[in-house]
Amino acid sequence: MDWGAFRLSLQLAFFTVILLLPIAVLMARWLVTLPPAPKSIIESLLTLPLILPPTVLGFFLLITLSDSSSIGRIWRSIFDESLVFTFEGLLVASIIVNIPFAVQPALRAFEAIGSDMREAAETCGMSSWRSFRRIEFPLAWPGILTGGVLTFAHTLGEFGVVLMVGGNIPGETRTVAIAIYDQVQSFDNASAATMSAILLAISLLAISITFLLTRKALSRNRL
């Protein structure tokens, strides 16, 4: 049992959610205000990580974050280390890969609020920020929460991008998905089955808690 891989996967999922969710909320709120044509184009671009095969997306990210790219050279000049095959590079890749999982539920939640409520808040003298904080965010909270949990669960199970960008370095980039693959390759099916069952239980628990909290939030919003 590779508990180090579990800890690293949970750490990666936690930081991915913490860093991505505020960006996703602001991006979703901004998309609601756009006209249909540019909104559709931007939504299509944000959905690409769902369409591209993980190895293809991982290859593009590997090239983008490598020392031969501008991003990679800037990172090395600041931190004196490569961005690829490190936890930091893995985190950057994880954030990019999970953008649609975080943005789409939040966007659907903000769309459901309707422009008439925003116009009513503006008529009452509320600023855009106050309207967002006091009205829109509480109403959109179930969708935002769903995006956070989907991001967390997807990060735990991500394989292709993790392997391409992070490799398989124990304690640094070896996640539980890669550890399971290694166990299968070494014909240790018992360990692979145990780790898979634990991963399944964590994901199921996270999704169940989300449904429960979302249902309670929706009930409060109806009152």
Image (cartoon, grey):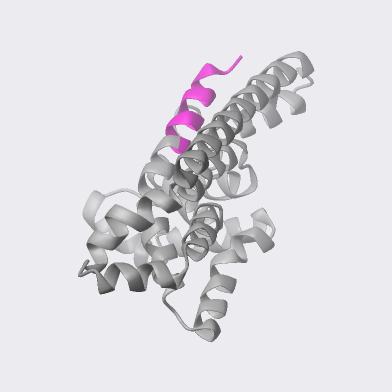
| Horizontal and vertical percent position of residue 23 | 37, 57
- Look at 78% across and 18% down and name the residue there: 189
Outermost residue toward the front? 223
Q: Quadrant of residue 47?
A: bottom right
In percent of the image, x 46 and y 49: which residue is there? 144
Q: Residue at x 27, y 72 (%)?
A: 122
Toward the viewer: 65 or 12?
12
Residue 183, quarter of picture: top right
Q: Is residue 9 magenta?
A: yes
State left or right for residue 71 relative to residue 161. Answer: left
Q: Is residue 217 covered in magenta?
A: no
Q: Is residue 127 above or below residue 222?
A: below
Q: In the picture provided, is 139 more to the left or to the right than 79?
A: right
Q: Is residue 40 left or right of residue 27?
A: right
Is residue 9 among the parts visible in the rendering? yes
Q: Quadrant of the N terminus?
A: top right
Q: Which residue range is magenta in the image?
A: 1-13
